[in-house]
Image (tube, rainbow, N blue to C red):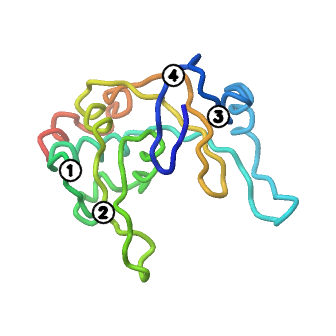
Amino acid sequence: MAAVGSTVLLHRRGDTMTDQGDMFGLDYLRREARRPLKKCTSCGGNVKTYRRKLNAGMAAILCWLTANGDDDAWVHINDLPKRILSSREFGKLIYWGLLEQRTNVEDSRRSSGFWRTTEAGRDFALGLTVVPSHVFVKIPGGEFIDFEDTMVNVHDTIGDRFDYGELMRGE
């Protein structure tokens, strides 16, 4: 699996594509993710590999956007219900290629605040596909490294925290 810009390209293990995850291996990445924060010897900044889970809040946002938006409609973050925005981790869905952010054109703002699901995100929300359960990223910069090899569907991620039927009815 590889990241190209902010889009994640998924591929099956064993394909010929090479990335950092393939170089280090999942066992190495899992160990690194359990280690404490380190200081960079060059700049003194914090350096860490994180293992991020695709969690219930992230899946709920995908379901709500799928139920309430047109396929290509951009939705402002402030228009999402507060009950599904509690974790504010929706931006991490970019690593899986399930969500995309509209380019910011205003210099006075950090981001545009507009998001939409990708085709892969809609398929996941509708229960048509599975995705890796976790992503490994390196901080600073949020650099994509690799995915865990465990796959999950939307119901696995939502669990009992949200009602899937309500989310898909746009409630």
Which residue is label 1 attached to? Answer: 72
Q: Earlier in the sequence, mark 4 or mark 2?
A: 2
Distance between mark 4 and mark 2 Cα atoms = 30 Å
The residue under label 3 is: 19
Of the two numbered discs 3 and 1 on the same chain, state the one appearing first in sequence. Answer: 3
From this view, report whether residue 93 is shown above or below residue 112: above
Neighbour tally class for label 4: few under 14, some 14-19, many 20 plus, Cα within 10 Å? few
To which quarter of the image does residue 39 belong? bottom right
Which amino acid type is marked by label 2? Phe
Which residue is pictured at 59% across the width and 16% down the height? 14
Residue that label 4 marks: 150
Seen from the viewer's position, the closer of residues 44 and 161 is 44
Say which of 171 and 94 sits in front: 94
Nearest to viewer (mark 2 / mark 3): 3
Residue 5 falls left or right of residue 58:
right
N-terminal-most mark, 2 or 1: 1
Mark 4–mark 3 distance (CA, rounded to whole Å)? 18 Å
Residue nearer the viewer, 30 or 14: 14
Sooner in the amino-acid sequence: mark 4 or mark 3: 3
Q: Residue at x 74, y 32 (%)?
A: 31
The amino acid type of the residue labelled 3 equals Asp
- Residue under numbered circle 2: 114
* Foreground: disc 2 or disc 1: 1
Secondary structure state at the residue bearing disc 2: strand
Q: Is residue 115 above or below residue 32?
A: below
**Residue depicted at x 76% and y 47%:** 36
